[in-house]
Amino acid sequence: MTRPSEKVALITGGSSGIGRATAVAFAKTGARVVVAARRRAEGEETVRLVEAAGSTGLFVPADVRLAAELRALVAACVEAYGGLDYAFNNAGIEGTGYVKTADYDEETFRQVIDVNLTGVFLSMKYEIPALLARGGGAIVNMSSVAGLMGGAVGAAYHASKHGVVGLTKTAALDYAKAGIRVNAVCPAVITTDMAKRLFYQDPGIAKEIVAAHPIGRIGTVDEVADAVVWLCSDQASFITGETLRIDGGMLAGL
């Protein structure tokens, strides 16, 4: 892996799961890491893990639904470390799974779109000027296999993750010549608290979920984190507008 020495990475939703694992993965490359999340104690624990991995980190409380907080987040990043090179827009919520579209609660739908889709848009809106000031950089947005197919996870989740794919492609085209690469990762089921809530309350559903991955297991947070760091590295310098499936073969075919 190319070491992004003295590079600066910003991660939303960095208090647990994939966000935390990615913060640590960036730290291991030598990058300084800014962790954003709503949960202070968990976010500060991620910073401690970043420091244990040999780098420096900063926790900034931020709600991705609020433009003012994202503006302040990027400003804090630039003030602390002099700029921004990489961003992983990871914050997300699941909403309500296994509910048919006509039965889906309207307010829950709005909340999921606000966090999962509008939050990615607002994050990029304030990250991109900082990347441009640095002469370029890389953004990775969190989508999902749910952004590439329909399913039972819920209308809002599928809609939001499809939206992230389209937003990623548009931003990639907008800034390709300016030296900013924008990609998305599309994981299948990964060992996170969200997955446990959605899929592991019912042993029958849990068995079906594992069987849906041809590789024979669900993924780990470190496998997604490594893919994010790679997409930001020089090794992926000719990749932009991509939706990278990290799915154990789930979407390869029936």
Image (cartoon, rainbow, N blue to C red):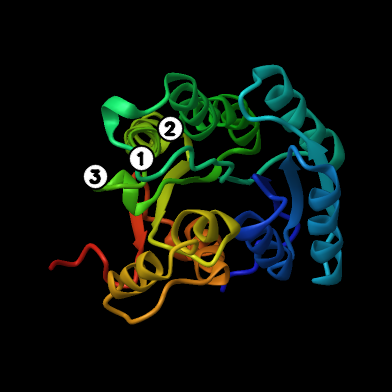
Q: Which residue is mark 3?
A: 150
Q: Secondary structure at mark 2?
A: helix
Residue positioned 81% across, 38% down in the render: 60
Decide: is 124 above or below 212: above
Residue 207 percent across, percent down from the top left: 36, 73
Determine which quarter of the picture holds residue 171: top left
Question: Can residue 242 be seen by looking at this rendering?
Answer: no
Decide: is 31 above or below 243: below
Q: Which residue is mark 1?
A: 154
- The CA distance from mark 2 to mark 3 is 30 Å
Between discs 2 and 3, the one toward the N terminus? 3
Decide: is 211 above or below 92: below
Q: Amino acid at mark 2?
A: Tyr
- The circle drawn on residue 175 is 2
Q: Quadrant of the C terminus?
A: bottom left
- The CA distance from mark 3 to mark 1 is 9 Å
Question: Can residue 7 be seen by looking at this rendering?
Answer: yes
Q: Amino acid at mark 3?
A: Gly
